[in-house]
Image (cartoon, helix red, strand yellow):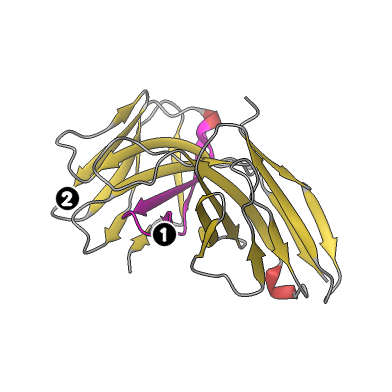
């Protein structure tokens, strides 16, 4: 298993450009997530998906869009890139939604995409 | 809304000694999970340990243990016999079954030879 893969690893965008960050997992996980990590900070949730065709907003969704047409793929779209979107983006997946106190439902993370908007 | 607080921006420990990284959480949900992740300088997020809110015993995973004090809402990570490879950022996170994980701001641990 490759686990969670992300492409590209690095990208530099100009203000106003758009791009799609790719995320694929081969563990047949139903839940997938996108986080961003600003320098010196913890991760913040952008969007998540509980299965193909179902997505929902996280803490910081503005400026982003997602889709989930298959179990494996969960791309993140940036439209009209802004300097505030300079960050490291992590995709993650898990098998079951955590309810707390029950069996472990670990999120597995991809290696991240480092995005700079100039 | 839940909040995770890690009050130690940086910690130093001598090789082979034990170290405790602090984490407090704030949630009104009775059912939740607590996690610790390690982020080395290479940037990936590595799962270390999990504690469920109803677990009676503290979680352990090899050299990692979680000191869970429910009444104090704390979930401190204890690393025993520190190794140079333990130098990294450590994040505490919580989930209450709503919107994925909420992360703390992290603690940078440096292990000295």
In the image, is residue A95 part of the stretch drawn in magenta?
A: no
Distance between the alpha carbons at the discs numbered 2 and 1:
22 Å
CA neighbours of label 1 inside 10 A, class few (<14), some (14 to 19), many (20+): some
CA neighbours of label 2 inside 10 A, class few (<14), some (14 to 19), many (20+): few
Query: Is residue B60 placed above or below A83 in the rendered structure?
Result: above
Q: Horizontal and vertical percent for residue A2?
A: 65, 28
**First of labels 2, 1 by sequence position:** 2
Residue situated in front as seen by the camera: B61 or A90: A90
Q: Which residue is mark 2?
A: B70
Q: Which mark is residue A84?
A: none
Query: Is residue A82 placed above or below A76 in the rendered structure?
Result: below
B105 lies left or right of B49: right
Residue B42: image quadrant is top right
Q: Which residue is mark 1?
A: B99
Pointer 1 chain: B
Q: Secondary structure at mark 1?
A: loop
Residue situated in front as seen by the camera: A32 or A69: A69
- Per the rendered image, the range of residues in magenta is B86-113
Mark 2 and mark 1 residues within 8 Å of each other at the beta carbon: no
Pointer 2 chain: B
Residue that appears at 61% across and 32% down: A26
B50 lies left or right of A57: left
B2 lies left or right of B73: right
Q: Horizontal and vertical percent for residue B61?
A: 35, 26
Query: Is residue B38 placed above or below B31 in the rendered structure?
Result: above
Q: Are marks 2 and 1 on the same chain?
A: yes
Quadrant location of the N terminus of chain B in the rendered image = bottom left
Residue that appears at 69% across and 69% down: A85
B67 lies left or right of A43: left
Q: Horizontal and vertical percent for residue A105?
A: 38, 39
Residue situated in front as seen by the camera: B70 or B28: B28
Q: Horizontal and vertical percent for residue A48?
A: 52, 57
């Amino acid at each position: 298993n490759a686990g969670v893969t992300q492409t590209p690893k690095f990208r530099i965008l100009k203000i106003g450009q758009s791009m799609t960050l790719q995320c694929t997992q081969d563990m047949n996980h139903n839940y997938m997530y996108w986080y961003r990590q600003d320098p010196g900070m913890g991760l913040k949730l952008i969007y998540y998906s509980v299965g193909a065709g179902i997505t929902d907003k996280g803490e910081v969704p503005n400026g982003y869009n997602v889709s989930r047409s298959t179990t494996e793929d969960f791309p993140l779209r940036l439209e009209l890139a802004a300097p505030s979107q300079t960050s490291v983006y992590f995709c993650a997946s898990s098998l079951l939604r955590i309810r707390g106190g029950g069996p472990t439902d670990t999120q597995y993370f991809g290696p991240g995409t480092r995005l700079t908007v100039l | 809304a839940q909040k995770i607080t890690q009050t130690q921006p940086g910690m130093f420990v001598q090789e082979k000694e034990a170290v405790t990284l602090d984490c407090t959480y704030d949630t009104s949900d009775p059912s939740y999970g607590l996690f610790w992740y390690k982020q080395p300088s290479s940037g990936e997020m590595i799962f270390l340990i999990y504690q469920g809110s109803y677990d009676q015993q503290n979680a352990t995973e090899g050299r990692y243990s979680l000191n869970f004090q429910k009444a104090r809402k704390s979930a401190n990570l204890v690393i025993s016999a520190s190794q140079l490879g333990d130098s990294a950022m450590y994040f505490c996170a919580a989930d209450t079954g709503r919107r994925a994980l909420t992360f703390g701001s992290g603690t940078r641990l440096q292990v000295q030879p």
